[in-house]
Amino acid sequence: MWTTTFKRIIKSGFQSFRRNGWLSAATISVMVLTLIVITTLLMVNLVASVVLENLQEKIDISVYFKSEAPEEDILIVKSQLEKLAEVQRVDYVSREDALLKFKERHQDNPYLIQSLQELGENPLEASLNIKANDPSQYEGISNFLGGISYSTIIDKVDYRQNKEVIDRLSNIIINVKLIGLSLSGLLVLIVILVTFSAIRLAIYSAREEIRVMRLVGANNWFIRGPFIVEGALYGIISSLITLAVLYPVFWILSPKLSGFLSIQDFFVYFQANFWAFLVLLLGLGVVLGVVSSFLAIRKYLRV
Amino acid sequence: MIKFKNISKIYPINSEHTVALENVSFVIRPQEFVAIAGQSGAGKTTLLRLLLKEENPTRGDVIVDGQNLDKVRYKDLPHYRRKIGAVFQDFKLIPNKTAYENVAFAMEAAGKTDEEIQKDIPEILKLIGLSERAQHFPFQLSGGEKQRIAIGRALAHRPVILVADEPTGNLDPLHTWDIIRLLCRINEMGTTVILATHDREVINTIGKRVITLDKGRLIRDEENGRYLA
């Protein structure tokens, strides 16, 4: 009995999807536009966060130690820093390492190398490169360094010199994330309302039918089932069309965008997340279609 | 057995009250054929809507086979309505289903098996005389054909009562008689038929019990009656 009813509901849903060809096409068009907007937003957010991460990667602060500071003290400071929750990573650069890097970087500059040799000893200081989890935390780390018992061996912390740049950058990062998030939220809301209206219109056109079905003695699930199947079909088909449209579009736009945003390859991000997008869009499309149908039909079942 | 007991129905429209039915009482026996006569606005449709429990009476009780409709819950309405077949003036077929599927719908909704449906529907189509139109959609059928399909749908789940609200209102005289003859045949096969109509000729020709309504009141109830108003 239940399987028969279920089979009839599914069959009837497919049938009316097919027979209401134009209405289905119109609803799917609206949903495709909707999903394209959502997917594009997601891509923009994804790329923006990659760009921001790249920027964030470039921010760090270095602590320079006086030449006579013993290595074991520096390593104690390092381990103290590593215990802080705000600190993501600390790299120790010894005086010798610093010299090697300096030589490597300036190997094309014979004057510098020469003057270094004339100096006879290593003029460079040992340092700790500190990377925080979040750019806004550098201030606190810098203050922490000023307060520890080993502060006497510290020559300088370059945070104070770079403070303005770091502050501005961390502000930009926070703002971009906030604006991106609220804009996406707003657009998603609009898009959901538009889809809901489209489906409501489709069901409005069937309101007389729904009444008659009630009067002929059909129970609510038997009436609503096919509409929900139709809603799910709208969702599945629109999400597949959306990806089929965006795939070549992103592929064509990718080289232009990638150069502009200084990331490796826009399209690669899309490809890498393709299956996640597919699952997400399918889920979103089906939920949007099913929930809209379910809500839109409620009012006509009150007979 | 259908009992209307002291039924009143009042519609509040813009703080004014429109009385659609006023203290109407009568009984319909099983397998009876009853015509409900009266002009537009006399309350015929309201009476049938109360029987289908599309609406509830403001006062009074409708009792069908000993069951007070006031006590039928929303959840149990579909089950109750399967006792009744309904036919309307504007047919109310499902536009994107074929004639066959429209008739099958009521049976499917009632949970009949595929075998029962495949066995019964050809018989029903034969009874209504539309076997060769089974695969047509409503828009491909004439008014009379549509109404016969609607009657087929109303009969499909074998109701004990058939209510027809102005079933010939949109039809020409020739098709009108088709439909009336069909209703009489259905009644002879054992179904209670309630026919609401303002068609004087129909009522005077069939020679059945006539209940006449006027402005919401029952003014006449006669066996083998005539429409006099």
Image: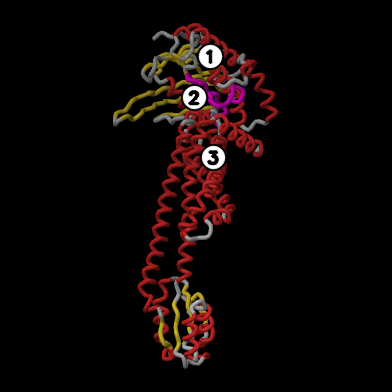
**Residue pictured at 43% horizontal, 44% vertical:** A193
Identity of the amino acid at label 1?
Answer: Gly
Q: The residue marked by circle 1 belongs to what chain?
A: B
- Is A142 positioned to the left or the right of B103 in the image? left
Chain on which label 2 sits: B
* Of B160 and A60, the residue lying toward us: A60
Residue A208 shows in this picture: yes
User: Where in the figure is residue B143, as x and y percent of width and height?
Assistant: 51, 15
Side of B169 where B138 appears, left or right: right
Secondary structure, mark 2, is strand
User: Chain ID for label 3?
Assistant: A
Residue located 46% across and 52% down the image: A41
Would you place residue A286 above or below residue A88 in this image?
A: above
For the N terminus of chain A, which image quadrant? top right
Furthest residue to the left? Answer: B15
For the record, the magenta segment spans B79-102
Residue A234: image tag = 3
The amino acid type of the residue labelled 2 equals: Lys
Q: CA distance from mark 3 to mark 2?
A: 48 Å
- Residue at which label 1 appears: B144
Q: Is residue A220 visible?
A: no
Circles 3 and 1 on the same subunit: no
Q: Which residue is mark 2?
A: B3
